[in-house]
Image: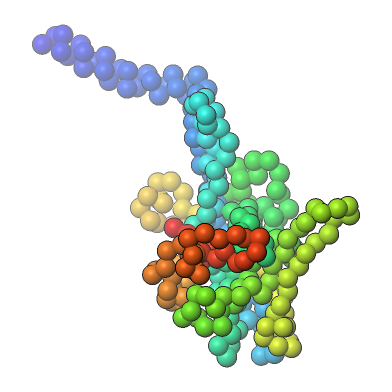
Amino acid sequence: MKTLLKAIGWFFLLLIAIPVVWLGSGFAYETWQTYVHRFRLTIEVETPDGLKSGSGVMQSAWTIKASWIPQTGGVIPSLRGDAVFVDLGNGRNAVAILGMGPTGSQDGIASLAALAFGRAKPDWFIDAPHWTGSAELNFESIPTLVTFTDLNDPNSAKAIYATESVFAAWPRRRVTLDEFATTFGSGFRLRRATVEMVPIRSWPLRLLGLGGEPITRGIEKQLAWITQIRGYLNGKFACNPSIESCLEVGHFKRN
């Protein structure tokens, strides 16, 4: 009996000692760590009937992989949220998708806060959870905007605003696609896009679903097919972003 009690005592002592040694050794700082922040993306469009806008809260998470584990290291970004839908009136619409570039194939949405605040330095995401306020995105950093001529038809999507930097030769030249006026008529123009930092639930409150600004959901209210399609909107199993628009469900909703 004494031997059993002694073994139990050593067991609980080890339970206490291991975390203490772990923290003191520095290994705790070599484990996988995730830094999370949330922001509200707002898109504003000028129309003949006045200013129209849409907004949505997204969550950006950056995980630093443990460097002491073989074949790991580096950072993994991820995003949760829905595309931002702007009702332009009279059946017209503009959607800021979760992608960038002329075909939406460039992934920089998780870095929108850094781009807006001009803080895209190494490891910026570590400080991002403490940022406050709002800032305007420059026009090269705005997500791709598309429109659906028929909201019930995913194949009716057309890019109406996108930018891409090309280093074909010096000096640097920018290729810009801006078809608001061409698509909708005179008086339509992208005015601006802003990013506002919003509070996120702190642990352990987020485990209980309490506090913070919730991630905006509900894009399926405008795009009902979003829950029915898998993969590319055009129904193909492969896509070449250099020659066609490779829009997929992930450009409109990420869980």
Could you tell me if residue 73 is visible in this image?
A: yes
**Left or right of residue 114, residue 149 in this image:** left
Q: Residue at x 30, y 17 (%)?
A: 13
Image quadrant for the N terminus?
top left
- 6 lies above or below 179: above
Q: Residue at x 35, y 53 (%)?
A: 208
Q: Residue at x 49, y 26 (%)?
A: 69
Residue toward you, 182 or 97: 182
Query: Residue 15's x, y, as percent?
Result: 32, 22
Query: Residue 203's x, y, as percent?
Result: 43, 46
Residue toward you, 34 or 238: 238
Query: Residue 20's x, y, as percent?
Result: 42, 21
Could you tell me if residue 143 is visible in this image?
A: no
Query: Residue 51's x, y, as percent?
Result: 66, 83
Residue projecting furthest to the left: 1
- 146 lies above or below 248: below
Q: Residue at x 71, y 44 (%)?
A: 121
Image quadrant for the C terminus?
bottom left
